[in-house]
Amino acid sequence: MEIIGHKKISNKLPILGIVFILIVILGLVTMEIPRHIYRLSTEEMLEKTMKHDYIIRYDKFFDIYHNNDSLYRFIDLRSAKDYQISHLEGAINIPISKILDFKYRDIVNQDEKINVLYYSDQGGACAPWMILTQLGYKNNYILGGGYDYVKNHIIDEYSPMLGSFLGEKAKYDYKEIINNTAGGASASSASNDVSDTPAPIIKKKASAEEEGGC
Amino acid sequence: MNKKAYFLPIIFFALLFVNIGCSTDNPKNKKLIKEPAKEINESEALVKFLEQSGNIINAKRIPTLISAEKVKANLKNFLVIDLRKHSDYVAGHIDGAVNVSIKDLVSYMKTKVAAEVYDKIVLVCYSGHKASFAAMTLQLLGYKNAYAMKWGMSSWDKNTASTKWLKAISDKYSSKLEKTDNPKGAKTKLPEIKTGKVLGYDILEERAKTILNKLDFKISVDKLMENPSDYYIINYWPDYNYQKGHLPGAIQYDPKLSLTADKELLTLPTDKKIVVYCYTGQNASYTAAYLQILGYDAYTLTYGANSFMHSKLTSLKIGHAFNSSQIKNYPLVEGELPSIKKEGATVSEEPEEDNATPIIIKKKSTAEEEGGC
């Protein structure tokens, strides 16, 4: 009996083995392999972020744009609609929501061209840049100031100093306020009108309100 | 049978792993691109940059001169930068003006001013020359709201006018004017510049700092007339005014048209001093700044035609003659610091020792009066 039983088990072993392996294979096949794996640790990412060398400044942009430098490629992260209205010459449109699509992988990770990512403002391109960089994708940079700044202050009319590079426009010159309240010497100052008539006596208004204290 | 049964799945299993290994992309295979070092001709790169970045030398708004009246009426929205000596600033300045040395101007603008906040940034000097020279430099650097106050403080303050513009106007070379058309020079190369930079803007910034530090751009008519043949004299007027009479040997260049590489810029000599003259010396200062940035040995004829054919500017209907109506004699504010607007200013309780005509508003110096914590 024992011998017969042993034979029965040994006969079934290959089948069991095949079934086991098939289950494993089925599991592997149906398993979702993560497409995107972060290759950089958070510390490495922080180090990269601190360097600030991933931003293409307006002077460099000007050079690339006017010389049609083929080493660089612009990637427009805005919506297809915004892209249609206007975009940088030669730019590819990859809306942010599709930046991780498989079909764009070879564009955002490659070693032939330097990608310059841009959004309406500079901040909009930062998050996609961080994701791509942490995935280990190489040769991606951000357009400093973003599209609106570059369009208005570099391409249409060259006035880089008058647009805000960071997408915000200061409403007041705070240095002036600090200067005036603290009496500093070097800060800039805009001034109100002086009295039109050169009257011999100009009375100082007494209320502290006008002087802008705390 | 048994061997086959084991063998096949194992092969399949191995292949699957190989397949998985291939399907996960490995970005580490890609290499970082380093931009190859470029060898550039700095002069050409700079001219190209300047002409592509708005071609400011020929822009409609140049020269960006603004009258004292407009400055006074808009002080609230303007930043006034006083480029005069500190002692003169302390003695009396436009209310709210800040005193900056022209040598520090580029770094001051870059680090201490939110330029876009102001409608205009108005540079002020004694006669308008230095302010024009600096305004053009700022314009080229991208501050399109940089202006120079026309006639300088001579238009604001009577005392300055009497030592500067009123003293300078003259007709001393009126009789020596000629009407012949003098030919332009043959085309030559651009002057050589060496800043060690690669990008157009960086080269420009270096050049801007250099010329503002050197600050050698003025020549008087007397010095010029001592030996006119030593200079390449540019008459920067429209042709119809050139025909009315110009300095001997002067060559006409059309304002807002001629000084680009594809027009007549290359006709300027690189081995000779260039003197640009206009009606008042202010537009010429804009032009000289541009030419100096490009590396030319260029100068402004101070006070322009006003310094040698003042009355003819009116009689020949050329215009731009300085006269007393331009002296507004507006109030000045005395003190070390930028004044704190009208509320912070009060009239000096002790009258000035000298009998200065302008009304000096003395700012109180105590911190209390300036507000704040």
Image: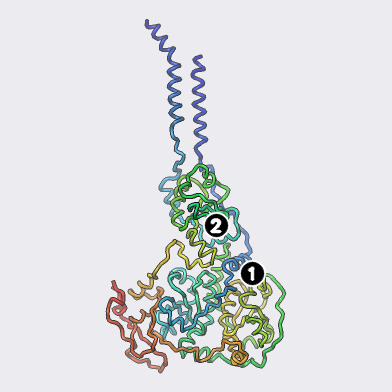
Q: What element carries label 2?
A: loop
Quadrant of the image occupied by residue A2? top left
Q: How far apart, in angstroms, are the residues tagged by discs 2 and 1? A: 34 Å
Front: mark 2 or 1 = 2
Q: In this view, does B33 lie to the left or right of B372?
A: right
Q: Name the residue under label 1.
A: B192
Picture coordinates of residue B13, whole percent (x, y): 49, 26
Q: Which of B165 and A97 is in front in this view?
A: A97
On screen, residue B248 above or below B144: below
What's the residue at 50%, 42% (across, down)?
A: A102
On screen, residue B315 above or below A115: below
Q: Mark 2 points at which residue?
A: A88
Q: In this view, does A90 lie to the left or right of B107?
A: right
Q: What element carries label 1?
A: loop
What amino acid does circle 2 point to? Leu
Residue most toward the top?
A1
Residue most toward the left?
A207
> On the rendered image, what quadrant is the C terminus of chain A found in?
bottom left
Quadrant of the image occupied by residue B231? bottom right
Q: How crowded is mark 2: few (under 14 residues within 10 Å), some or many (20 or more)?
A: some
- Chain letter for mark 2, please: A
Q: Is residue B332 visible to us here?
A: yes
